[in-house]
Image: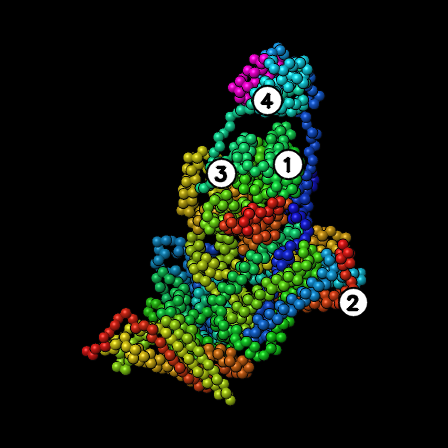
Amino acid sequence: MGKIIEFLVRTDVWLGTIVVVLVPVLSALLFHKLKELRRQTNMRPKQHFIPSSIVLSEKLTSNVKSIKAIVGDSSDIIFRQFKLGNDNRSCSIVHIDGLVDTQQLQQAILHPLLHGKQTKTKLNLFKSQSIKDYLLNHTIEVSDIKVTKEIDKVVRQLLSGSVLLLVDGLDEALLLSVKKWVSRSVEEPISESLVRGPRMGFIENLRDNTAILRRMTTDPNLTFKDFDVGERTKKQLTIAYIRDIANEELLTEVTRRIEDLDIDHVAESGYIEQLIEDNYFSIFPQVQSTERPDRVMAAILEGRVAIMLDGTPYVLIAPATFSIMLQSPEDYYERWIPMSLIRVLRYVAALLSVFLPSFYIAFVSFHQGLIPTDLALAIAGTRVGVPFPTIIEALLMEVSIELLREAGLRLPKPVGQTVGLVGALIIGEAAVQAGLVSPIMVIVVSATAISSFVSPQYNAGIALRSLRFLSMFSAALLGLYGISLFFVALCIHAVKLKSFGLPYVTPGTLYSKEDWKDFFLRLPLFTMRKRPAEYFPKDQVRMRKK
Amino acid sequence: MASKRVVRKLSLCMILLLCLSGCWDSSDIEDISFAMGFGIDASDDEQEPIQLTTQVALTKKQGEQATAQQGKLFQNVTLKANSIHEMVRGLSLQLPYPILTDHLETVVINQDIVTDYDLFILLDELLRDNITRLSPSVVISAQQASDILATNIDGEITSDYISAFFTNETSTMKILPKVRVGDVTANLISGTSVILPKITKDKKTVKLDGAGIIRAKDNKLTGFLTDKEVEGVNWLTGEGAGGLLNFRDEKGNTIIYEIQHYKTKSNPHYKNGKLTFDVQITAQGWITEDWSLTSNNLSEKYVDKLERLAAEEVVKIVEGTMKKLQQDYKTDVVKFYDSFRIAYPRDYQKMQKDWDNYFADADVKYDVKIKIVNTGDLVKEGKPK
Amino acid sequence: MKLGTNQITTNQMIALLSSALIAVGIFTLPRNLAIKVGTPDLWISTLIGGVFSYLTCLIIVTLCLRFKQLTFFQFNKLIVGKWLGMLLSAAFIGYALLIGSFEIRSMGELTQFYLLEDTPICVIMISMYWVAIYLLTGGINPIARLIELLTPLTICIFILVIVLGIKVFELNNLRPVLGLGISPVLKGLTPTFLTFSGAEFLLVFIAMMQKPKEAKRVALIGLAIPVSIYLLAVVIMTGGLSVERMKHEKWPTFALIQEYEYRGVLFERFESLFLVVWLIQMFLTYIVCHYVAAEGVATLTRLSYKQASYMLLAAVYFICLIPSDLNQLEKMGTIIGWTSFAFSFIVPSLLLLIALMRRLKRDGEQESGT
């Protein structure tokens, strides 16, 4: 009894109890608050950049005036007034200089309009309906013509490169698409080069990108669905999917998130990625991004959804899981045995890139007894005279490697290589000679760096590299125990994380035979008769024979 | 705003806490003295009767590449006290860095100290300790353990050197299998006698030479076995990994038989308080040296003869060993208790405490079969000179 | 997608059950068994204990399937009335907390003994609790997923480490079989049965299963995995160490791993690997216990599940500090064993009997009608 009372009055017990509860509660509250931040609605009212009061009238001069009022006096906007060839009606062409194919404009639009002759039908040209009919059916030699009344659309189209034709007596505008602007040619993507596979990457122009996808299949179910994103800039965004494969719920979820987007300007698909992902605190990328059309095609054939944005070659694919981050299209192009081995190698590399330095720290400064005797003596020998504890030594080296990498990345290629060489060889060698770091540390750090570059997905590589620092700290704090705690915490984070409703660690959990055929190993193609079950595709069978 | 400041302060406190705490166990690898070997001796001092020599690896030397191969790679520290752990801790007075016994390779025990002290007591600290492993080898020495450990062999740490001897097990029958601390414990706990390899210093080097026997009665040293007798022990336990058998033919020519593998089986019979063991030994191997010039090694008759002679030689060796074990030392170090335990579990329970005496009175019969599978590449015609 | 459900799949259930069963027992069972049995027949005791556990599991499953989608905390009221049911639930919560704290404390002691000698044990335990609560607040699905993710890994590594003990394995140590008859084997049943505690958590989890009909299969496989692991461990340990030594080692499992060394392999010593894996396994067991307790508190009181799990954190921490040394901790283990016996065998069979007599069944008629 006395013992119990003695126990109850121990202050350390109470203090511990308070700490053990208070810290998680407080941090949970903090995180809850931070998560709320994202949900807060913007205070800005819905903006209208084009006054809706203006409407198109039948008078040409007033129409031209109002358009001028909207777009201002920009020097690149060309207004050209002329008279229609057959009845001297006033017309006006408005277009942006540089976004229009001038030659086509001359030949297919201006020429027929100026030299038009009323031939077969007797048109009452004073009726607006018939002048429209005349223009559309008999005169203009452009295939993509839109007729609209909405001033908003008219201006947006004009500014995106359409030629605007205004005719006196018509309260509608004709939008003629003879767009042409400078665009990059299709090249091999630099960030995802393969030894074998199509040497083709997406480019900045959305239409070209959809065309690339379209050219890969004649499946009528390949569907593109357009959105305008960016409150002010209204960029074009397209989601691509196969109608009879992609899961409905996934589609509605993706659509909902894209429609919910609230941003001024979307510069790159990275914006979209960050705004539609599930958990913005996570270090893992929850949406896959790629420049490779073959990758996108394979993904949408598995029942995933691709999100393409105008102005960037990076296409997003949702949902994404961790295992996808370690897969490369090449896995399927080469034979299955070597590629399975390579895939296992990637998993090993991912583990190494996170845990190697921390294991080194744990063994060298905590559990010297657990490494082989000869190795222990060797390490001890090399560390003689190194003035820092292992963690500082490791941080020093890791940070300098990251610096070198970053510096090499930004510089022009030849200079970048020199920086890499100088850094790796000279600084490393000199640091060892000066006794600042031990040679074994240099080996550990460079092995780690190399394995972090193995990841075929650049953003997964960055995530793993940042995790490495956390794991090093936990090793320096509690040794092997710290590493295992960190590992467990990482796993917990991963199992809690979802990408568009799909657990991030699939197929590590929710075992399914189909998914495991393409997880650690890449089994022969004929074994993968069904699409991965993890995405719940509507059409599950991929190959006929069974 | 206020809450934000509180949050900021709190998180700062957390980070500080993390930095201030932590790293309780962190110590850098170069700031550690690796104990490689222990030597336990008796000392003359009444108050401090035990003397412990600790062999510490010198890591500094390994860093200097040029001089690594020469010079001493270790440092020995000798202390006296009346308990082992006290001495291990006493090392802190003489060594700059804390001692780590995780990498212990060898424990050398002087013969005088085990005649005075219970072996179990001497090893007690090592077994209780949470970091020392059970794998260091235990050897017994005729000379002072401190002298053995002080032997300076170029480029080697003595205790590492000693423990490496046991990898030669396959090449000779005169080496006992490595006896690890764990094995000794197993024997001490189950109340059976232990046989420990004996190490002696020979001028500038050390060598294995016979074995010492610790009797189960009081865990003290009873005596030593010679090389030849160790060979017998290996034949009887069946735990050797192979080696040579040297015998002579009827004309006195030396013949060497190399054992590839052999098997020993002891079948106990216990009737009316009479204990007998039938020992069956079967061996397979080849002739690697044959000095007789007149024999035809292709004839079956000759090979049969050699097999018989070899078997006789084995019986001779084994009988010699057995005689010493049963009559002089009265200890069962050849693990006959194991086969008896399996065959007569109930009787063994009663006899366990006094097993060594039962063993000493037991009758042992031998049945040795040697098989020669090959007589080597050389063929002699068998013509008389 | 079908992923948002609150139910757990059959695979997850199997992993959950096995990780609830594999716990500290792997360290304590071999010695307790060796002391009780004294002959090399330990493995027979383990096997019989496993079969007996399966029988109790069947009782639990039959009971739970009578009350579809109700946890133990909900259906015991229906059987024995409100107040007695409350009492049973409270006792069950207490028991779950006891196991949870026992696991964490043992984990802390082992870690301190083998890995971090100077680190205060409260730091070791508190850091573990923090990681645990991060998972616990997510509810059953992340828990089930984590267990499904890690259990195969830990089991594989554990089997590997134990099987490597073949190097010191001697068949003679396992002989003779039944040399002293069957009576020592029977003596060993108590510690074995006490070690296989954890099956009673099925009382709560069956209600959450996606396909409750597969509960019997879950019980079979979920028990077969831990039992075969224990069996393997006991066999290799007896062969490698001999019964006599197992009696005298504090942690025989560790003694076995320290016995062998594989030179030239990067690791050479496998304790570190084993310890890390075992930490994770203990963590998982603790998570299961804490979840059950929090679920119980949430059912009984007005607290939400999250609030309950935060509060229980304090309780668990408090309980795990009560044993002042290792001997008391072991006593705690024995108490847990007996309580476990009550909850896995006595309580379910009594409840089942009463339910059978009163013909209680939930939703039975309605379901057959539709």
Q: Chain of mark 1?
A: A
Q: Helix or strand or loop: what does disc 2 sit on?
A: helix
Check contact, mark 4 vs mark 1: CB within 8 A. Answer: no
Q: Residues within 10 Å of mark 4 (few under 14, many from 20)?
A: many
- Residue of label 4: A176
Badge 3 element:
loop
Label 2 close to label 1 by CB (< 8 Å): no
First along the sequence among labels 3 and 4: 4
Residue A109 magenta-highlighted: yes
Residue B37 percent across, percent down from the top left: 44, 65
> What chain does mark 4 sit on?
A
Q: Which mark is residue C218?
A: none
Q: CA distance from mark 3 to mark 4?
A: 37 Å
Q: CA distance from mark 2 to mark 4?
A: 85 Å
Which residue is identified by label 1? Answer: A258
Question: Which residue is located at x 39 percent, y 74 percent?
Answer: B262
On the same chain: label 3 and label 4? Answer: yes
Mark 4, secondary structure of its residue:
strand
Q: Earlier in the sequence, mark 1 or mark 3?
A: 3
Q: Is residue B329 left or right of residue C156?
A: left
What residue sits right under mark 3 in the picture? A191
Q: Could you say where residue A162 lies in the image, as x and y percent from the top left?
A: 59, 23
CA–CA distance in space, label 3 to label 2: 72 Å
Q: Amino acid at mark 3?
A: Ser
Quadrant in the picture for residue A47: top right
Depth check, mark 4 against mark 1: the one in front is 4
Cβ atoms under marks 2 and 4 closer than 8 Å: no
Left or right side of A289 for C7: right
